[in-house]
Image (spheres, helix red, strand yellow):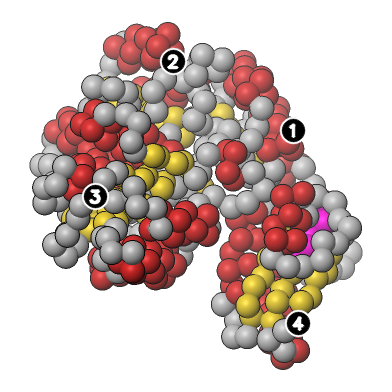
């Protein structure tokens, strides 16, 4: 076994790219483990935990760690790194060659752009986003871990300039048919979304798509926009933009539970918008996202189609409690609200693996399933766990084949539980459309064949889990 570590000084690539590179290298024959990442302290700790000697490096350096069977396998792995990290072909050299822009502002001046997409690490995102605003660009801030006071300052600047900031932590947006971040493939149509929730917006768009209703725009304003400190700044601005948009006939506002005073301000603005507005502000006693989707479909003049599902084999039980292992924060909150309303709080656990505290220095769980698969196996060994809710989110930017990783993990977890004389039920909310690149049907079949029941509605999946705990048939 050969362990190879190298540091490339002053070489930056974003975490999403590097996670994809790591996965590609690990897929090479003879490669046991690989980590290609920026040398943050967390990533250096991960490298050490994989058995590598930790090198001297800074967060501005790229670190590569590969464990291979032999020199030939190591050579293939390093060649795969080079190929995967290759940049676009350089422009022809010579006296007339144009140097690439080095700032957002210089890129805007050269290319005539109208929107900037910022995905730099959280501590540096503010400077790039402010640069974009000061050069007259709307900004999509994909970056998370941006301090809330910086978010407030960016949105104040945007308001003063008549611009819109989507984010920080804007995981999903669709502007005029162009997807940003994690975006499902949806048809154009009359519904405009304002979303303080990435996966909540994806669930709604996918349910609407399944009912034949398309999207004009999805404006992801960031998960904190409806908090008291931010005050709904981008939500209110986005509502005004959609009010003036001829392609938008129905507006939906989706969010995890907002601050009460901010929710009141949004309701007041919605009442004056001049277009039908449906509020999907999750909270106890409020409609779930599937019920909201049905309402929106009716408002758009279309026929509602109940979301599809793929049932698992008959269950044996018993199922004492539910564990929600979610990649989507709003999906996690929706499931928690439904379960606790029916079964009471306390006995059931829900974890949002996409929370900022769990994504600092590592890719989002829509891309990297490793933390969730580890937890799934831990739950399989826990006799108090009977049902696992495990969401799978498809679309551009997400894992290219999540079932290829999760289906074997589900089989293994169910076998581990079976060896201990009990059944482990896995219920999968599958968020996607028929046109997503991962192939919705193939993903559903692979997960069902692994023993999971699969639902295109997260709310339906949560209710299936509730039925299993109650001893009924899902």
Query: What residue is shown at x 26% (from left), y 29% (from top)?
Result: 344
- Across and down, in percent, residue 428 comes to 30, 54
The Cα atoms of the two marked residues, 1 and 4, are separated by 42 Å
- In front: label 1 or label 3: 3
Q: Which residue is mark 1?
A: 127
Neighbor class of circle 3 (other Cα within 10 Å; few <14, some 14-19, many 20+) is many
Q: Nearer the viewer, residue 266 or 365?
A: 365
- Element type at mark 3: loop
In screen coordinates, is 31 left or right of 179? right
Q: Is residue 215 visible?
A: no
The magenta region covers: 60-64
Q: Which residue is mark 4?
A: 2
| 1 and 3 marks in contact (CB < 8 Å) | no
- Element type at mark 1: helix
Main secondary structure found in the magenta portion: strand
Q: Earlier in the sequence, mark 2 or mark 3?
A: 2
Could you say which quadrant of the image residue 417 lies in?
bottom left
- In front: label 4 or label 3: 3
Q: Which residue is mark 3?
A: 319
Query: What residue is shown at x 39% (from left), y 39% (from top)?
Result: 349
Residue 365 sits above or below residue 241 on the image:
below
């Amino acid at each position: 076994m050969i362990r190879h570590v190298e540091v490339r000084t002053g070489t930056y690539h974003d975490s999403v790219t590097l996670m994809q590179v790591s996965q590609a290298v690990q897929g090479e024959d003879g490669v046991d483990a690989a980590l290609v990442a920026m040398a943050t302290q967390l990533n250096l700790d991960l490298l050490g935990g994989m058995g590598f000697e930790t090198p001297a490096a800074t967060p501005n350096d790229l670190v590569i760690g590969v464990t291979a069977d032999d020199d030939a396998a190591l050579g293939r792995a390093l060649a795969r790194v080079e190929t995967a990290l290759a940049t676009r072909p350089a422009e022809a050299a010579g006296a007339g060659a144009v140097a690439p822009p080095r700032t957002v502002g210089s890129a805007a001046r050269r290319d005539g752009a109208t929107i900037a997409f910022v995905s730099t690490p959280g501590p540096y995102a503010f400077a790039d986003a402010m640069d974009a605003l000061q050069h007259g660009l709307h900004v999509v801030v994909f970056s998370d871990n941006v301090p809330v006071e910086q978010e407030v300052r960016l949105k104040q600047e945007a308001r003063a300039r008549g611009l819109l900031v989507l984010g920080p932590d804007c995981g999903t947006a669709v502007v005029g048919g162009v997807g940003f971040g994690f975006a499902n493939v949806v048809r154009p149509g009359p519904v405009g979304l304002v979303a303080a929730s990435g996966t909540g917006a994806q669930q709604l768009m996918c349910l609407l798509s399944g009912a034949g209703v398309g999207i004009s725009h999805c404006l992801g304003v960031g998960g904190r926009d409806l908090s008291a400190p931010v005050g709904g700044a981008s939500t209110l601005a986005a509502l005004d933009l959609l009010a003036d948009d001829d392609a938008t006939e129905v507006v939906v506002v989706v969010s995890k539970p907002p601050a009460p005073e901010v929710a009141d301000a949004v309701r007041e603005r919605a009442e004056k918008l001049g277009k039908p507005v449906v509020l999907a502000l999750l909270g106890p006693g409020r409609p779930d996202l599937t019920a909201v989707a049905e309402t929106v479909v009716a408002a758009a003049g279309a026929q509602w189609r109940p979301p599809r599902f793929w049932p698992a084999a008959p269950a044996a039980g018993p199922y004492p409690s539910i564990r929600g292992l979610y990649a989507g924060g709003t999906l996690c909150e929706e499931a928690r609200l439904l379960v606790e309303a029916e079964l009471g709080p306390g006995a059931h656990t829900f974890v949002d693996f996409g929370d900022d505290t769990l994504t600092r220095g590592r890719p989002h769980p829509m891309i990297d399933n490793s933390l969730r698969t580890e937890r799934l196996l831990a739950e399989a060994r826990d006799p108090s766990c009977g049902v696992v809710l495990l969401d799978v989110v498809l679309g551009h930017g997400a894992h290219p084949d999540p079932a290829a990783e999760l289906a074997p993990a589900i089989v293994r977890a169910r076998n581990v539980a079976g060896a201990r004389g009990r059944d482990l039920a896995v219920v999968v909310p599958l968020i996607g459309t028929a046109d997503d690149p991962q192939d919705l049907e193939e993903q559903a079949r692979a997960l069902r064949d692994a023993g999971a029941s699969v639902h295109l509605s997260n709310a339906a999946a949560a209710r299936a889990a509730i039925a299993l705990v109650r001893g009924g048939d899902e």
